Image (spheres, rainbow, N blue to C red):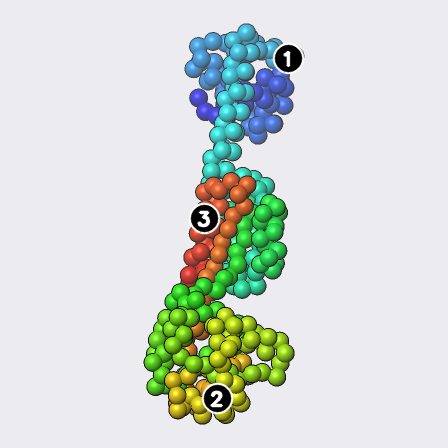
């Protein structure tokens, strides 16, 4: 007994007409007749009463019609479940938010994912990091991807990008890779202030955080450089003086958290999003792409 025989019998049972049932199942009338006879032989009962005007099912035929319908319905359900297990639910939609720094990872990963799960719809949203956090908490996006600077040495000195610390090459801190505030406590400090009010505010805050506001000596970049060459001072300055420091062969910029940081991809999922096999695959592709690019 084959599934197509069940389909043919159901068509005949509903239409009660051999020619129409044969057309619906795309076989000839004679082939349909042989198919029904084969079913009757296998069942051992007459299923159809034939006459010149109509087709009637026997009592056994009515019972078999219910069986055939249920079997075909179960077959379709099983096909659907198998399809979903491989491809995800038909019509499923995922919303992925990402920042500009993750834009070289997310679109590539989504393209690879859609090649495997073409029936899952993906909406990508380019957002600021704070907006991603808000939308994730509200359940407006399923996955957020952003790039975050992490510190590779664990320094507790956190300077804005506009500021630098530097010393002479002979200073004890010159080759140290893990500089802490405590390391700076033993050494006096020079300061070279900026003409920018915004950067000057950052300088003042940094000096306060290093506990040097009461003892710092202030001068021009030339005076500060000359002072470093003759002492164990360290210096703070704005980024506008980076070239002057880099061009001086006896000076070296200290390795703070800023100079040793790197970007790490952060991937988060909405707590309400059910993590299944294909979502796991998408997350895996995102992380793999990030590793490859980095």
**x, y (%) of residue 228?**
42, 88
Q: Quadrant of residue 20?
A: top right
Which quadrant of the rendered structure holds the N terminus? top left
Q: Nearer the viewer, residue 253 or 237?
A: 237
- Element under disc 3: helix
**x, y (%) of residue 72?**
52, 24
**In this picture, residue 234 sits left or right of residue 31:** left
Q: Residue at x 54, y 50 (%)?
A: 143
- Which residue extends farthest front? 214
Q: Residue at x 36, y 80 (%)?
A: 174
Q: CA distance from mark 1 to mark 2?
A: 110 Å
Do we see residue 191 in this rendering? Answer: yes
Closer to viewer: mark 1 or mark 3: 3
Q: Which residue is mark 3?
A: 281
Tell me which label, 1 or 3, sits earlier in the chain. Answer: 1
Q: Which residue is mark 1?
A: 54
Which quadrant of the rendered structure holds the C terminus? bottom left
Query: Compared with residue 286, is residue 67 higher up or lower down, i.e. above or below?
Result: above
Q: Nearer the viewer, residue 163 or 120?
A: 163
Tell me which label, 3 or 2, sits earlier in the chain. Answer: 2
Q: Which residue is mark 2?
A: 224
Badge 1: residue crowd in 10 Å (few <14, some 14–19, many ≥20): few
- Contact? badges 1 and 3 (CB < 8 Å): no
- Element under disc 2: helix
Q: Quadrant of residue 24?
A: top right
Badge 3: residue crowd in 10 Å (few <14, some 14–19, many ≥20): some
Q: Residue at x 46, y 79 (%)?
A: 165
Q: Nearer the viewer, residue 181 or 289?
A: 181
Query: Compared with residue 219, is residue 187 higher up or lower down, i.e. above or below?
Result: above
Q: CA distance from mark 3 to mark 2?
A: 56 Å
């Amino acid at each position: 007994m084959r599934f197509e025989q069940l389909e043919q019998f159901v068509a005949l049972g509903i239409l009660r007409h051999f020619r129409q049932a044969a057309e619906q199942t795309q076989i000839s009338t004679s082939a349909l007749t042989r198919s029904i006879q084969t079913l009757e032989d296998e069942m051992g009962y007459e299923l159809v009463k034939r006459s010149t005007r109509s087709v009637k099912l026997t009592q056994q035929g009515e019972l078999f019609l219910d069986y055939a319908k249920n079997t075909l319905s179960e077959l379709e359900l099983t096909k659907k479940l198998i399809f979903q297990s491989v491809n995800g639910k038909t019509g499923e939609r995922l919303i992925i938010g990402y920042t500009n720094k993750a834009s070289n990872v997310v679109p590539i990963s989504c393209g690879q994912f859609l090649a495997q799960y073409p029936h899952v719809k993906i909406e990508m949203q380019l957002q600021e990091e704070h907006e991603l956090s808000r939308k994730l908490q509200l359940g407006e996006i399923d996955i957020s991807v952003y790039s975050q600077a992490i510190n590779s040495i664990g320094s507790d000195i956190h300077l804005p990008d506009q500021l630098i610390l530097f010393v002479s090459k002979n200073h004890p801190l010159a080759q140290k890779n893990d500089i802490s505030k405590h390391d700076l406590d033993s050494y006096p400090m020079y300061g070279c202030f900026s003409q920018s009010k915004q950067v000057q505010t950052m300088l003042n805050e940094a000096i306060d955080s290093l506990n040097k506001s009461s003892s710092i000596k202030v001068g021009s970049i030339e005076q500060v450089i000359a002072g470093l060459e003759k002492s164990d001072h360290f210096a703070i300055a704005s980024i506008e003086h980076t070239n002057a420091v880099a061009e001086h062969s006896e000076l070296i910029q200290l390795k703070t958290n800023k100079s040793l940081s790197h970007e790490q991809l952060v991937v988060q999922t909405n707590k309400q999003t059910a993590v299944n096999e294909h979502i796991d695959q998408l997350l895996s592709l995102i992380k793999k792409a990030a590793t490859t690019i980095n």
